[in-house]
Amino acid sequence: MDKIISTGFSSIEQVQEKYLKDYSKKTDNINIEGGRSFEEILRSIEEQNSPQELKFSKHASQRLESRNIDLSDDQVERLNTGATMAREKGISNPLIMVDSLAFIVNTPNSTVVTALDSTENDSNVFTNIDGAVVI
């Protein structure tokens, strides 16, 4: 014998309206990860993954100035491109070569740590890097 279970609903639409509507009310304002909403977390991740303009550390700025290195707009753009490429590959401290200039960049902080003209470097040894990009 078939048993008929009565729920008081005459259609699936009534069930959906009752349960999905109640569920969405409960979850609309849920904050996760320390009180931040999903939208805030998503925006934060998008900002982290978007190309960021590099900044120069005090040390790197002093190196450029003391060596009379003036970067053209094209070189700065290529340096930014190299940093983005390194970041996308998971390299956190790349050596980025732009023309005859060498830069070590901290990609998580979008900061040029040091800069030099590679023709001035006698040993051509670079330490504390985990990858290289030649632009």
Image (tube, helix red, strand yellow):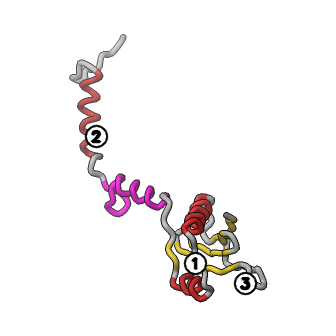
Which picture quadrant has residue 118? Answer: bottom right
Q: Residue at x 67, y 75 (%)?
A: 102
Q: Residue reaching furthest right?
A: 123
Locate the C terminus and report the quarter of the image it occupies.
Answer: bottom right
Nearest the viewer among 40 and 95 is 95
Q: Which residue is mark 1?
A: 70
- Say which of 116 and 72 sits in front: 72
- Residue drawn at (65%, 81%), measured in percent from left and top? 116
Q: Quadrant of residue 117?
A: bottom right
Label 1 or label 3, whichever comes before in sequence order: 1
The answer for how far apart the CA atoms under marks 1 and 3 are is: 15 Å
Locate the N terminus by quadrant: top left
Q: Residue 43 versus residue 37: which sits nearer the camera?
A: 43
**Secondary structure of the residue carrying numbered label 2:** helix
Chain part drawn in magenta: 31-49
Residue at (60%, 84%) from the top-left corner? Answer: 68
Q: Amino acid at mark 2?
A: Tyr
Tell me the kind of residue under disc 1: Asp
Residue 115 is situated, as x and y percent measured from the top left of the image, at: 62, 79
Type of residue at label 3? Glu
Which residue, given by chain and number where applicable, does mark 3 sit on?
Answer: 120
> Is disc 1 placed on a helix, strand or loop?
loop
Whether residue 91 can be seen here: yes
Disc number lying in front (3 or 2): 3
Residue 29 falls within the magenta-colored stretch:
no
| Residue 83 visible at all | no
